[in-house]
Image (cartoon, rainbow, N blue to C red):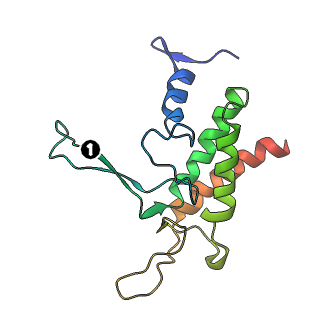
Amino acid sequence: MVAPAVDGIDLLTRATDLLNMFTAEKNVLGMWDSVDGGYFFGLRFSGTSPAHPGRAIVDRKRKEAGRQAIMLQAFHLANALTVHRYANMESRMLEVALRHIYQPAIHGVPSIVNANWSFQRFRNGTLNEMVTTEAMGTELESLFAVGRCVSG
C-alpha cells in the first residue's frame, strides 16, 4: 500500500510524526499519565499571548475521559498502517478504554474525571457523574474500530 500524499506531503509520515509525541515512550508534552494511564486534561501556557506563550504547564488534576478514547482509534489505525509499530500504545489505550473510560456504575462515559479516574465533585459535594453523548460516541467509535478489525 502506498501512503497517500497531498501537495507532495506524505500523510502517513505527517500523522505518525504527530502521534509519536503522544506515545508513553516519548511523551514529549508530558500528557501521558504513567501512573494511572491515559492522558491528562491538557496544557495551559504561562505567557501573555500567542507571540509570548511562556512555558507549557500540564493540567495533571483531571482527564477528559471520553475525548481521549479517540487516541485508541488513532493508535489502532497507525498500528495497522505501520506493521504494528504502535502495538504497545494501542494495547495501553484499549486497557484505558475498557478499565477506566467506560464507567459501569453509571452505565456510561463521563466527560471529565479526576486524574486517578475517580468522579469529580460539584461545589455542593455531590458527585459529577454526568455522561455526555460526545464522550459515549467517542468511546463507541474507538471500540467498534478496534473490534471490527479483531473480529473480521
Q: Quadrant of the C terminus?
A: top right
Give the side of residue 35 with respect to residue 2, left or right.
left
Which residue is at 54% across, 73% downward? 118
Q: Position of residue 32 (x, y in %)?
A: 51, 49
Front-most of residues 127 and 116 = 116
Name of the residue lying farthest toward the left: 48
Density class for disc 1 (Cα within 10 Å; few <14, some 14-19, many ≥20) is few
Which residue is at 60% across, 63% downward? 101
Give the side of residue 42 with respect to residue 81, left or right.
left
Total residue callouts: 1
Give the side of residue 146 with respect to residue 100, left or right.
right
Front-most of residues 57 and 5 = 57
Tell me which amino acid carries mark 1. Answer: Arg
- The answer to whether 94 is drawn above or below residue 116 in the figure is above
Name of the residue lying farthest toward the right: 152
Judging from the image, what secondary structure is the residue with disc 1 in?
Answer: loop
Q: Which of the 4 image quarters holds residue 122?
A: bottom left
Which residue is at 41% across, 87% downward? 125
Which residue is at 54% across, 59% downward? 66
Q: Position of residue 148 (x, y in %)?
A: 77, 45
- The answer to whether 61 is drawn above or below residue 78 in the figure is below
Q: Position of residue 95 (x, y in %)?
A: 69, 55
Q: Which of the 4 image quarters holds residue 1?
A: top right
Q: Position of residue 119 (x, y in %)?
A: 51, 75
For label 1, the residue is: 55
Name of the residue lying farthest toward the top: 8
- The answer to whether 99 is drawn above or below residue 79 in the figure is below
